[in-house]
Image: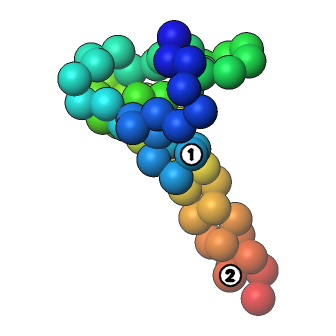
Amino acid sequence: MIKDKKSKHNKLRIFYYNPKNHSGVVNKRKGIGSTINFGSKEGRHLFAAMMIPVFIAIIVIIVIVALKK
């Protein structure tokens, strides 16, 4: 675990990006939990898999609202 206050792999202090680490999910630097490694292909696929249903839901809501008019 990294002990310093700012990691060179954390972008905007939110996103973990380390292409040399092939893990899709890594432990957070502080506290409990994990975060997605956007530098790995597995991490990007995991993020896309979580976002696709959100975009589909938004499109469905827009279509339903448009059809009610």
Identify which residue, 49 or 37, lies in the foreground.
37
Question: Of the residues under marks 1 and 2, which one precedes in the sequence?
Answer: 1
Residue 23 image label: none
Circles 1 and 2: CB atoms closer than 8 Å: no
Tell me the quarter of the picture where residue 43 sits: top left
SS at mark 1 in the image: loop
Residue 66 higher or lower than 54, as above or below: below
Q: How many marks?
A: 2
Q: Residue at x 63, y 54 (%)?
A: 57
Q: How is the image coloured?
A: rainbow
Identify which residue, 43 or 61, lies in the foreground.
43
Q: Residue at x 46, y 34 (%)?
A: 7
Q: CA distance from mark 1 to mark 2?
A: 39 Å
Tell me the quarter of the picture where residue 45 sits: top left
Answer few, some or many: residues within 10 Å of disc 2's Cα (few below 14, many 20 plus, some between 14 and 19): few
Could you say where residue 29 lies in the image, as x and y percent from the top left?
59, 21
Identify which residue, 54 or 68, lies in the foreground.
54
Residue 16 visible somewhere in the drawing:
no
Q: Residue at x 52, y 52 (%)?
A: 12
> Quick one: quadrant of the C terminus?
bottom right
Residue 63 visible somewhere in the drawing:
yes
Could you say where residue 10 lies in the image, as x and y percent from the top left?
46, 39
Residue 34 higher or lower than 64, as above or below: above
Q: Amino acid at mark 2?
A: Ala
Tell me the quarter of the picture where residue 30 sits: top right
SS at mark 2 in the image: helix
Task: Looking at this view, name the residue that lies furthest to the front.
Answer: 4
Task: Looking at this view, name the residue that lies furthest to the bottom.
Answer: 69
Residue 13 image label: 1
Q: Residue at x 51, y 11 (%)?
A: 1
Q: Amino acid at mark 1?
A: Arg
Return the residue at label 2. 66
